[in-house]
Image: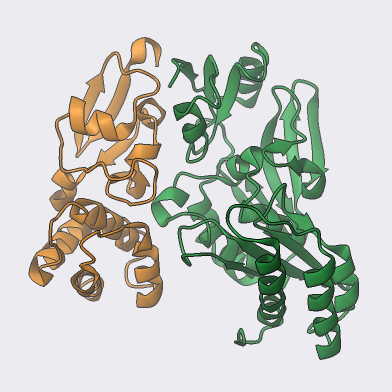
């Protein structure tokens, strides 16, 4: 990691960055160095889930992750979610259900739900799945359509 | 945030050397980072070096007969999704799920939670009730410390300079439960929490309370009152709840008053013991 070098796979593309300061958060790397503005900054304290991305297939909070501590990881952001079959199903379910109002929380919800369904498929009971989605906040309180989208995405899984 | 150097050694020996080369306030270990980064941000900690533990071979979970050993850098989410943890240590499963969100638990670790020893930790009380032992490794070699001698105060542990938490051992499966009171049920800090576990080997209940400073603690007088059997007699449970409410060293702080905590701890204990005993939580 000398010289602040950081190697990532971002949405399937090998990415090498130089001069990344140790304190930089993955959130800022993704948004400002890579220009992937779909990942949102909400609270920056790990409370709201707006900055959720996948690291090696699992949902993480990019605001609480030092970018260089993710060295070598495969990162998936909302911009790359369609290349994952589960991610595309989730995205389509949000679209069909109209599960957004202002849209700011939507990328985080889609990534969090994608991570959960990739982990367990339909084996997680619906009430537990919804509890597990509780790490994402929607300030518009548009939860009923989000729940509908989550249910539909889960039902469609094999 | 003050500038620091970030290193990620591949072996425990290298990590210990990286920490030991500087003083304790100049070099800090980084596990999941979900708590440490706040102290780095606001300057409560201003180390010259941050030693990431992510490359150490400690992301492990092993069952050896009745004994569970959890590597200190295993993400909490992997502890929670182990099917045997859920059935054999149900209170641990519940306590882990009380920490943050799924995404946070993909980052946060058991070692980090212990090493940071926040007074409102949801894991430390459960570890107390389960008699967890902490395996440490440092410049002077390895040693094992029971969790009640490891967390010694608010943000204070028995860790020596450059010493690291290698793993946490749970001696036996125990019927167990963890319950809490919060302003919001999830993703909030507990105002009051109760962890209970029944040890078949010792024929004894273990009861820990948490949520107030300076640290989570066992309450042996309550364990005595609950008696040696599972489930306890109704009169013993009543007495245990009374002893806990009136005699435990509960204090008030900005999150709840002492009077409120002493009142809420009664039903929390009763429900936790009933849940550990296999009954549905009563209201």
The residue shown at (68%, 36%) is B165
x, y percent for residue B108 = 50, 45
Q: Measured along the vertical axis of the image, is residue B140 above or below residue A111?
A: above
Q: Nearer the viewer, residue B210 or B91?
A: B210
Q: Measured along the vertical axis of the image, is residue A67 above or below residue B104?
A: above
Note the chain letter of the orange one.
Answer: A
In which image quadrant can residue B166 be found?
Answer: top right
Residue B218 can be seen in this image? yes
* Quarter of the rendering occupied by the C terminus of chain B: bottom right
x, y percent for residue B180 = 60, 67
In which image quadrant can residue B192 be found?
Answer: bottom right
Note the chain letter of the green one.
Answer: B
x, y percent for residue A13 = 18, 33
The residue shown at (39%, 68%) is A131
The residue shown at (43%, 22%) is B1
Q: Nearer the viewer, residue A104 or B144?
A: A104
x, y percent for residue A124 = 39, 71
The residue shown at (87%, 64%) is B220
Q: Nearer the viewer, residue A71 or A146?
A: A146
- Report whether A152 appears left or right of A65: left
Q: Measured along the vertical axis of the image, is residue B229 above or below residue B22?
A: below
Q: Measured along the vertical axis of the image, is residue A132 above or below residue A33?
A: below
What colouring style does the render use? by chain
Q: How many marks?
A: 0
- Report whether B162 appears left or right of A36: right
Residue B65 can be seen in this image? no
């Amino acid at each position: 990691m000398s010289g602040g070098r950081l190697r990532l796979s971002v949405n399937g593309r090998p990415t090498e960055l130089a001069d990344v300061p140790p304190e930089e958060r993955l959130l800022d790397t993704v948004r400002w160095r890579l220009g992937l503005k779909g990942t949102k900054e909400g609270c920056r304290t790990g409370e709201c889930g707006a900055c959720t991305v996948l690291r090696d297939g699992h949902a993480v909070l990019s605001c609480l992750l030092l970018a260089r501590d993710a060295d070598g990881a495969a990162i998936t952001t909302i911009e790359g979610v369609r290349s994952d079959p589960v991610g595309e199903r989730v995205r389509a379910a949000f679209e069909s259900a109209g599960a957004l109002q202002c849209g700011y929380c939507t990328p985080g919800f889609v990534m969090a739900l994608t991570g959960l369904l990739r982990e367990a498929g339909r084996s997680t009971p619906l009430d537990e799945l919804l509890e597990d989605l509780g790490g994402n906040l929607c300030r518009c309180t548009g939860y009923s359509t989000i729940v509908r989208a989550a249910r539909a995405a889960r039902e469609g899984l094999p | 945030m003050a500038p620091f150097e970030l290193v990620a050694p591949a072996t425990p020996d290298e990590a210990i050397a990286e920490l030991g080369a500087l003083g304790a306030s100049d070099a800090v270990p980084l596990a999941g980072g979900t708590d440490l980064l706040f102290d780095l941000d606001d300057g409560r900690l201003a180390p010259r070096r941050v030693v990431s533990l992510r490359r150490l071979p400690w992301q492990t979970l092993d069952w050896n007969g009745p004994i569970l050993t959890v590597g200190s850098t295993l993400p909490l989410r992997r502890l929670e999704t182990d099917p045997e943890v859920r059935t054999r240590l149900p209170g641990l499963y519940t306590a882990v799920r009380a920490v943050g969100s799924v995404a946070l638990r993909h980052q946060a670790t058991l070692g980090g939670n212990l090493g940071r020893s926040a007074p409102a930790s949801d894991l430390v009380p459960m570890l107390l009730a389960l008699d967890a032992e902490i395996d440490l490794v440092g410049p002077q070699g390895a040693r094992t410390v029971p969790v009640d001698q490891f967390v010694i105060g608010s943000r204070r542990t028995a860790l020596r300079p450059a010493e690291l938490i290698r793993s946490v051992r749970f001696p036996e499966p125990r019927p167990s439960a963890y319950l809490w009171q919060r302003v919001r049920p999830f993703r909030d800090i507990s105002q009051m929490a109760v962890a209970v576990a029944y040890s078949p080997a010792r024929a004894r209940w273990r009861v820990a309370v948490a949520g107030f400073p300076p640290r989570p603690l066992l309450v042996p007088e309550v364990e005595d009152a609950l008696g040696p059997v599972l489930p306890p007699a109704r009169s013993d449970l009543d007495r245990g709840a009374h002893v806990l409410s009136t005699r435990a060293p509960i204090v008030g702080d900005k999150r709840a008053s002492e009077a409120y905590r002493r009142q809420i701890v009664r039903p929390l204990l009763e429900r936790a013991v009933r849940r550990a005993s296999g009954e549905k939580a009563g209201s």
